[in-house]
Image: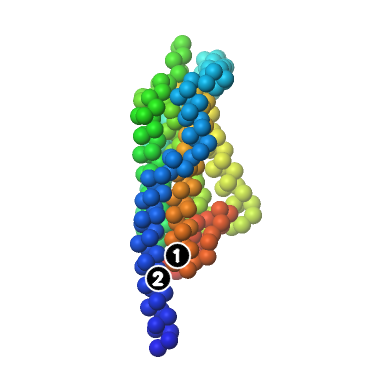
Amino acid sequence: MVRTTGSLVRRHRVRAADRRFGVRLFGAVAVAALAAVPFGLLLVLVEGRWHPLRVMDAGGARRLHGTALAHPAWTSTLRFLSDWVWDPATLRTVVALLTVWLLRRRAWRLAAWAGATTVASALTGLLVKTVVERARPSLPDPVAQAPGFSFPSGHAMTATTSFAVLLLVLLPLVPRGGPRILCWCVSVLSVLGVGFTRIALGVHWFSDVVGGWLLGLAVVASTAWAFEAWRADSGRGRSTVAEGLEPELNEDAPER
């Protein structure tokens, strides 16, 4: 009788936590951009046309553009990486497949987090681009073209959120030690590489890329906080970045 009562109480607690998780997740998405203090500071400098920042952007664009013109094979490689391997559509497709896999494992809340984080990243980036309306670099003999506004870099932001989602979901399935270090190295180098390709191809300023990185991190931090709050409310222990958001994912039994 005591065991049955305890089971009912725990079930009621989990259901209540699920409802609060949905509210928190929605709220985290809504305030993601506002939570990014470093991004807000950068946005002020961009909008204010701060001279040192403009000099740094222009200098970097000129140097990398000269390298791109002088080495066509190198530039073709950068275009392939930027337009195919690290393209936002490619990365979002990978996260979508991950979300489907999580649903098949009945990891409902983790799937909701992955999907909400990806959608929040795309919508937040589009909103900020529309508000800021920063023009892309205008260089002689451009080696690449890109539509839309420049700040923040959608490629950089999508790479940040996508690789963060992949890491925080899949780390529990990766053995500790060397394999996890390798996963972190691949993710960090990919995010940095995306930013470099966008600047080297002359379609973004350096500050656009930094803005994409910062805003992407803000989105992930906000939604991850909502997920951690749900774990605490439902009686599960808090996880760490090194262990992933849902350490129990490495268990054979699906999440209930």
Q: Would residue 108 be found to the left or right of residue 42 on screen?
A: left
Residue at the outermost right position:
177
Location of the N terminus (image quadrant): bottom left
Q: Would residue 221 be found to the left or right of residue 16 on screen?
A: right
The reply to whether residue 36 is visible in this rendering is yes
Residue 32: percent from the left, percent from the top? Answer: 43, 43
Q: Amino acid at mark 1?
A: Asp
Q: Which residue is labeled 2 in the image?
A: 13
Between 142 and 208, the one nearer to me in the picture: 208
Residue beneath the point at 45% across and 12% down: 141
Residue beneath the point at 40% across and 68% down: 14
Q: Residues within 10 Å of mark 2 (few under 14, many from 20)?
A: some
Q: Would residue 20 be found to the left or right of residue 37 on screen?
A: left
Q: Which residue is labeled 1 in the image?
A: 233
Residue beneath the point at 42% across and 25% down: 150
Q: Quadrant of residue 13?
A: bottom left
Q: Amino acid at mark 2?
A: Arg
Location of the C terminus (image quadrant): bottom left
Residue beneath the point at 49% across and 66% down: 236
Residue at the outermost bottom position:
1
Q: Residues within 10 Å of mark 1 (few under 14, many from 20)?
A: some
The reply to whether residue 86 is visible in this rendering is no
Asked whether the residues under the numbered discs 1 and 2 touch, taking CB atoms below 8 Å apart as contact, a structural biologist would say yes
